[in-house]
Amino acid sequence: MKIKVRLPFIGAAMVSAFVGLTPLFASAGEVNVYSYRKPKLIDPMFEVFTEQTGIKVNSVFAKKGMLERLESEGANSPADLVFTVDIGRLSDIKNAGLTQSVNGKRFADDIPENFRDPEGHWFGLTTRARIIAASKDRVKPDEILSYEDLADPMWKGRICTRSGKHPYMTALIASMIAQHGEPAAKEWLMGVKSNLARKPQGNDRAQVKAISEGVCDLAVINHYYMAKMLKDPEQVPWAESVNVIFPNQADRGTHMNVSGMALTKHAPNKDDALKLMAFLASDQGQEMYVQKNGEYPVKAGIPWSDLQNSWGPFKEDSLGLSVIADNRAAAVRLADEVGYND
Ligand code: FE
């Protein structure tokens, strides 16, 4: 018998933040997921999991407000798992005391240490490289080799990025703080800001579009947007106007972030949720993420997509994501201090 879980009153604005809200049920053979990831990115994996196990996955997609919702639901929350992109949201949910550790589970041990919480409260499922997209026409190969190069005055008026406070930019700035210390990272960010071709705006793909239109010559984007653009006829010319550069190959490697998941503190369907976690971390789950979403597998030994193979292997920054999480607040402050978005 299914029992409908009553949502606590959390205000119309909060409820409307949840797109496609459906009733959630806490009964045997089901897992309830709160997701910041778009349904089309994770539903195919859930479908295969259900086929193989008979366990149903109910997911609720939210653009924001997930942490607040988990907090307001407390021990009565129907949520078993939380799916997010970016280390920031994962660590925020952990720091709010809303998760539990899965340390000791074999699937967790398979995830490289730098892509999981040392205490086991979250781990990455896929990784994404923050690459530099460079105009094929206006940037010579080897002219730009590192994030540090982005601050070189030779790029004055030639760089486009999204908001300096977007989580993807925050994580990159946090990695610069971890690498160089805050004063040097601030100087770097001021340099990048002074090289911007326009006020930060739009998403990652909009920056590549701007390169194709001649607005700028360099952009900083997550790698999988190249795969997405190449699948959309309107956007193919954007993607084809740029070369993909994996920064910092001569030293620490390219900055990486994750999409990941966490087991909620009060997960009512914990056993089945653990099975779903194990499935997504399995070779089959990892291969689906690569082929369907263009993301990199978090585990070694999983075959890459043709596009990924065309770019070839690259050196990843091995900096632990928990270190990046620790530097996020400072990164947001630096973006403010240099007026990055002004
Ligand atoms: Fe993204």
Image (cartoon, helix red, strand yellow):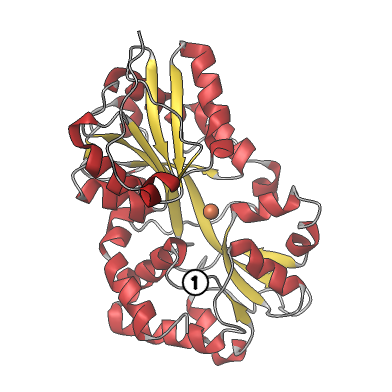
- Is residue 236 left or right of 29 when viewed as pictured? right
Q: Which residue is mark 1?
A: 163
**Image height of 291 relative to 315, above or below:** above
Which of the pair 82/312 is nearer the observer? 82
Q: How many marks?
A: 1
**Image height of 306 relative to 314, above or below:** above
Q: Can you tell which quarter of the image residue 179 is in?
A: bottom left
Residue 249 in view: yes
Amino acid type at mark 1: Ser
Q: Which residue is pictured at 28% across the width and 51% down the height?
A: 91
Q: Which residue is pictured at 69% across the width and 47% down the height?
A: 307
Q: Residue furthest top?
A: 1
Residue 197 location in percent, x, y?
Answer: 62, 84
Task: Say which element carries label 1.
Answer: loop
- Is residue 276 left or right of 95 when viewed as pictured? right
Q: Which residue is pictured at 70% across the width and 73% down the height?
A: 210
Residue 12 location in percent, x, y?
Answer: 38, 48
Assess disc 1: are there few (<14), some (14-19) or many (≥20) residues with their C-alpha within 10 Å of its C-alpha.
Answer: many
Q: Can you tell which quarter of the image residue 268 is in?
A: top left
Q: Which residue is pictured at 40% across the width and 32% down the height?
A: 33
**Image height of 12 relative to 51, above or below:** below
Residue 302 in view: no
